[in-house]
Image (cartoon, grey):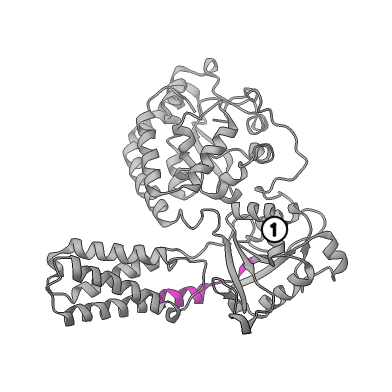
Amino acid sequence: MTAESTVPPPAGQQPRAAGRAVSVLAPRRPAAGRRLPAGRRGRPPRRASRVPLPLVDAGATVLGALVVPRAVAYPLVVVVLALGVMLLNRRAGLYDASVTRGALDELPAVCGRIAVGWAAVAALSPLRPLPLTVLVTAFAVHCAAGCAGRAAVHGHRARRRRPSPALVVGPVTAARPVAAALLRQPGCGVRPVGLVSDSLDVLTGSGDGHGCPVLTTDQETHRAVIQNGVETVLVVGAATRVEKAALLRDLAAYGCLVWELDTDPPSYGSGGLREGTGHLAGYPRRLLSPGGGRQRAGAGKRVLDMVLSGSLLLLACPVLLVCAVVLRVVEGPGVMFRQERIGKDGRPFTLLKFRTHRPASAHEAATRWSVANEHEMSRFCQFLRRTSLDELPQLWNVCRGDMSLVGPRPERPYFVAVFSQTHPGYRERHRMPTGITGLAQVHGLRGDTSIEDRCRFDNAYIDNWSLWQDICILVRTAVLFVRPTGS
């Protein structure tokens, strides 16, 4: 779809006013009533990259292999060993940047998986005739290098880590002590910026959470997430998890990590602490939501985007230049079309396209559903739209990190607001970066097509994301590139 023409909305999809504020858009001015502490507004703090730890494991594998005299003759064995160890570490969650660990905490798990890798090499590879002392020495060097590298990465992260803004969800009487404990322990990496509770709790409680405002509506909660860059949500008690299930799903869709804290006194005499995944300021915690796909679609997707978009930009430079010159001659000044769109986690960005049609006004372009109005365009503009060449400048958006090559198509703020309230699952599309093409587009859902169908395909893409799926969608898009479908 595009915002360059001003055709009314398709049947059955007329935008209508909604009664509830939209959660994916930051308000343009401070709202009346409670105000949250000042934070990094509009863009949440960047999480720790997941790239350094796999690089450390790969480098440690190479150092360990250098101890083996014949390893240089079998580089494929070294590559398979590195990939195997990295796969085992990934399955064990050792690359999860959302969990704070120490090098000593990881030592048994890391060394155990390295041992499995070298045992497989000794049993199955061409290096199996090597003396046991050589293999043990290679294993020891591999472990030492891997643990030392991980310690350096964790130390660097600890020095640069800032407490992550968090919301505490639960009754005020239970959430207040948790917030106070977290504020007393800044080294835990979490800083509460608000308590999410019910109005009744506020009346029975003291009305504050040790400096943290009490948020009693979903609108206040959504505003706090956006204004403070909240990435962590702490749920106090199993009952709260059930009562606030819908809100927690919304927060997970934004990319927040949702943890359940166990604040009940443990039964030390009957089996110790309840099952969990670590602790936070002494409270056992369990991960309820891994952030709605944010962790899975990480470095690999970004590397693919940068390599392909950069290469395509270089190859397409002559085409871009010709299109710009012809448009300037045929249509006059204003070759590029710039418009605000909504990207990952509800963050706005400026989308670039070649201008193929001029809307009546900026307001009308931003608030009217639009499809290509072919008879009002020049033949060259029709050609650009039929071949999708008008989308080529978006490769620069991909290089900048505003978009991805593959993902849900970005929309204008007005329609994100409307569709988030009228179409279940539309808000969840913003769990991952928006894209130039996507699963919905390769299934023909472009232009004047069902928003409900797009939501279903976009969320299916996110839920089943893999790098291979991105490659398949790009191949299918290349096949369809020159078909006269428009956008």
Kindly give the residue lying farthest to the front in the view shown.
270
How would you rate the neighbour count of disc 1 (Cα within 10 Å): few for under 14, some for 14-19, many for 20 or more? few
Q: Is residue 9 left or right of residue 434?
A: right
Majority SS type along the magenta span: helix
- Residue closest to the eye, 14 or 241: 241
Depicted 302 relative to depicted 50: above or below: above
| x, y percent for residue 169 | 71, 64
Q: Is residue 198 left or right of residue 316?
A: right
Quarter holding the N terminus is: top right
Depicted 205 relative to depicted 382: above or below: below
Kindly give the residue lying farthest to the top in the view shown.
375
Q: Is residue 115 magenta?
A: no
- Which residue is at 75% across, 72% downward? 176
Indicate the secondary structure of the residue bearing disc 1.
helix
Q: Is residue 154 magenta?
A: yes
- Which residue is at 13% across, 66% downward? 126
Can residue 38 be seen by looking at this rendering? no
| x, y percent for residue 61 | 27, 70
Figure quadrant of residue 95? bottom left
| Residue extent of the magenta highlight | 150-165
Amino acid bearing label 1: Val
| x, y percent for residue 362 | 64, 32
Pointer 1 residue:
242
| x, y percent for residue 375 | 53, 15
Figure quadrant of residue 425? top right
- Residue closest to the eye, 144 or 17: 144
